[in-house]
Image (tube, rainbow, N blue to C red):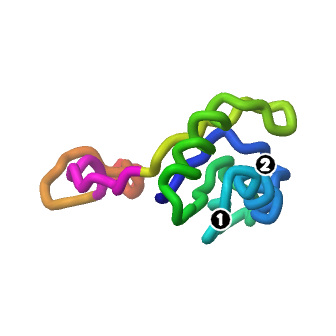
Amino acid sequence: MNIYIGNLPFNLGEEDLREIFEEYGEVASAKIIMDKFTGRSKGFGFVEMEDDAEANKAIEELNNAEVAGRNIKVNESKPRENNNRGGGGYNRGGGGGYGRRDRY
């Protein structure tokens, strides 16, 4: 089962995250999502556990638990939905506004 963890302390490492979840069972992987420009944690991550019963127990007991002064949010990760909200596209209006100053 893939588990989403939000509101992580920014100084928490992937090994720390793995250790927290290993108290509930075997962890296949632990990943903290990093900002590609700054290299800092984005404050959320994912843990994968093979045993669903262990994963559900971890979710139940760790959701809203305090980790380094922050209450983390833990739930089963759901696949992203493609709902076409965002991104460019043809004739969607708006625009950045750059270049208009050249006209005046």
Under mark 1, the amino acid is Val
Q: Secondary structure at mark 2?
A: loop
Q: Amino acid at mark 2?
A: Phe
Task: Give x and y (percent) for residue 101.
Answer: 41, 50
Residue at 85% from the left image edge and 31% from the top image edge: 69
Disc nearest the viewer among 1 and 2: 1
Q: Residue furthest left?
A: 91
Range of residues picked out in magenta: 78-87
Callouts 1 and 2 close, C-beta under 8 Å: no
Mark 2 Cα shell of 10 Å, populated few (<14), some (14-19), many (≥20)? some
The answer to whether residue 9 is left or right of residue 33 is right
Any magenta on residue 19?
no
Q: Separation of disc 1 and disc 2 at Cα? A: 21 Å
Q: Where is residue 40 drawn, in percent x and y?
A: 75, 59
* Residue 80 magenta-highlighted: yes
Residue under the point 17% across and 50% down:
92
| Residue 10 tag number | 2
Question: Which residue in the protein does label 1 denote?
Answer: 27
